[in-house]
Amino acid sequence: VIAAQETKKIVRKTHSTLNGRIDKTFHNSILRKKYISSRLIRVSPDADGVMAEALLTFWFSATDSREALRERIERILRRGLKKYTGPLRINVRSSTISNMDAKRAEALFNDICGLRQNRTVKSMAKSSSLRIVGGLSSAETGDWPWQASLQYNNIHRCGATLISNTWLVSAAHCFRDMSHPEKWTATFGAHLKPPSLKRSVKTIIIHEKYHYPIHDYDIALVQLSKQVEFTSSIHRVCLPEPSQTFPYNIFAVITGWGALTNDGPTPNTLQEATVKLIDSDTCNREEVYDGDITPRMLCAGYLEGGVDACQGDSGGPLVTPDSRLMWYLVGIVSWGDECGKPNKPGVYTRVTYFRDWITSKTDI
Ligand code: ARG
């Protein structure tokens, strides 16, 4: 679609520049509510420079005219790229937008992080009155496509989150005395039995600075022995940028097969609950966690108690949607003083702190 000068060097640069440029263009356009994402899928040498192909994804409603939308998208894209004044020379003339065959589009769509099919803000409002402790809100397969169960000798131990075709992120404390990958399996789907998919584990990487019984640096990476093929009901979450900040008091969702009451049994069906992010100053107050919250941690829940993660939820996700309803991994269930007690909210591993560490180990 786009030609530029100086092939090789530019191929790499094109990726970041163009992704950002296209994103910005649609964010600032009248289509910002319909725009989901843009992904460069191929950048290849071309007679005049490089050719870049991008997959643009938009929300459709039944009443939208496909052709009208296509023309609008093209107009906005051309205008946006024309304004670009960076080191690349973008040949707007040669840009074309075309529909893609359904199979290919679906595969690419399933590869987009953090999307929940057929889910709207409504389902989030619904879940806010429900809880994991108390166990009223059951999820269905596909509701939280990145959720995995980590099992030791086929018994559920911890939650984990899919961040690529082969990598899960979880909590370091899940592997205390049990760091042999051969005994671990990961399952996907809302039910522990029967799962929709099962994978054995190849590698477990525990953070170098995690030292039991201290909760700090409570993060681990789990590599699957065989990659999972993404579907609409099994795929990855989005990881936040290291610099990304999440405002306090926003709602976030926790999911897991953890106990429904303190010391209670493990449910077979995935549970979900909505919690609020709590700032660390509040969480470090004497009557809360009295200074135990480090920069590697994040509190979420309610100071009045009630809704919380619990034993068995560890390693699982705390996620929040952005304005386009793409879900980001904000925290990893780590610890708490029992479950759901007043002034004892859940404590989570702060994912932004470890974003670069994750890249250093996995290239993600
Ligand atoms: N450490 C627990 C586990 O291994 C999870 C604790 C979370 N507790 C809480 N109150 N939020 O599953």
Image (spheres, rainbow, N blue to C red):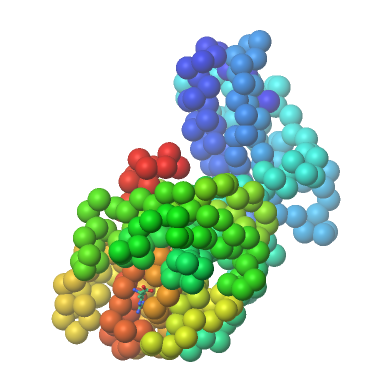
Query: Residue at horizontal 68%, vertical 25%?
Result: 1
Ligand 1 quarter of the rendering: bottom left
Left or right of residue 217, residue 223 in this image: right
Asked whether the viewer can see residue 130, the reply is no
Left or right of residue 294, residue 165 in this image: right
Which percent across, then down, holds residue 65? 83, 50
Which percent across, then down, holds residue 308? 41, 80
Which percent across, then down, holds residue 80? 60, 34
Left or right of residue 175, residue 55 in this image: right
Query: Residue at horizontal 54%, vertical 14%?
Result: 7
Quadrant containing the C terminus in the rendered view:
top left
Question: Is residue 327 positioned above or below 11 on the image?
Answer: below
Which percent across, then down, holds residue 20? 51, 37
Query: Residue at horizontal 70%, vertical 22%?
Result: 93
Residue 97: quarter of image: top right
Question: Is residue 349 positioned above or below 341 on the image?
Answer: above
Asked whether the viewer can see residue 184, the reply is yes
Q: How many numbered markers are drawn? A: 0
Question: Is residue 54 positioned above or below 190 on the image?
Answer: above
Question: Is residue 96 positioned above or below 191 on the image?
Answer: above
- Which residue is more in the foreground, 213 or 44? 213
Query: Residue at horizontal 49%, vertical 81%?
Result: 266
Left or right of residue 30, residue 165 in this image: left
- Which residue is more in the foreground, 24 or 230? 230
- Which residue is more in the foreground, 288 or 60? 288
